[in-house]
Amino acid sequence: MKSEINRLQACLLMLAVFITAPVQLSAQRKVTFLASDKLEVTADLYLYDHGAPYIILFHQENSSRGEYREIAPKLLKLGFNCLAVDLRSGKECRFVKNETAAEAQKNHLSATTLDCEKDVLAAIEYVGKTAIKNRYILFGSSFSASLAMKVANHNRKTTAVIAFSPGEHFSSVKVKDWLKDFDKLLYVTSTRREQPFVTELIGDIPAQCLTKYQPSGDGVHGAPALWNENPSASDDWMSLMMFVKKVKEEKYR
């Protein structure tokens, strides 16, 4: 109980910093790397410290790495480097065009949401080659949350998954089958409408692995729940920060 109170106090302090401090993008630079089918994948790299662990960020449908332009700088303040990835299935978000999707189209490569697993794996490989601490958290939004859970399962270098609005987003496969014997710390949140489907999806995940958060009100689909324009964003950030602090205490000592 005492540790939970201390964690809550630390998160309240950090939340106050989030609210009052301006967002800085000076640590951001664009990087590229190759997927297994030689597609050039574009991502934004946000560096907190070369020795810090990573959170790898994946966007939702019809989106881009721009989905995390507001979110990633705040995650840096929690002591993580971030890599926000353009997946090959996407378009644009916040005036940031999806360069990986454009490259896939130019080279006539398959770019379904399932094909994006190649890009997820390529991002992990890139972090593995550049990070001093070769362990990471995967952060997914909508369909990419489901992919992140799949890739993380039984992956010894993945410490945790943050899943905003995961679900059965693929017509040809059943996501729940990917999650058998799931063995990572998992944070899951969704809109009120999505809640019954998400509850079914994660029903077999051990309680000791799972942190489930249901926002007040209807909620916002995917990672945009953390954008400032969402009225409940501060509550959503509070919940997420408590989880990330837990991961750091348990996995990054």
Image (cartoon, rainbow, N blue to C red):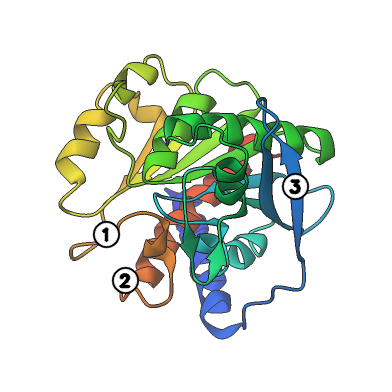
Please tell me whether mark 2 or mark 3 is closer to you in this view. Answer: 3
Q: Residue at x 68, y 76 (%)?
A: 24
Please tell me whether mark 3 or mark 1 is closer to you in this view. Answer: 3
Residue to which mark 1 is pinned: 215
Mark 3, residues whose alpha carbon is within 10 Å: few (<14), some, or many (≥20)?
A: some
How far is mark 3 from mark 1, CA to CA? Answer: 35 Å
Badge 3 marks a residue whose secondary structure is strand
Q: Which mark is residue 32?
A: 3
Q: Residue at x 56, y 36 (%)?
A: 108
Q: Amino acid at mark 3?
A: Thr
Q: Is residue 14 visible?
A: yes
Is there a contact, CB below 8 Å, between mark 1 and mark 2? Answer: yes
Q: Which mark is residue 13?
A: none
Q: Position of residue 210 (x, y in %)?
A: 37, 34
Q: Residue at x 53, y 27 (%)?
A: 152
Q: Amino acid at mark 1?
A: Pro
Q: How many marks?
A: 3
Q: Earlier in the sequence, mark 1 or mark 2?
A: 1
Q: Is residue 10 visible?
A: no
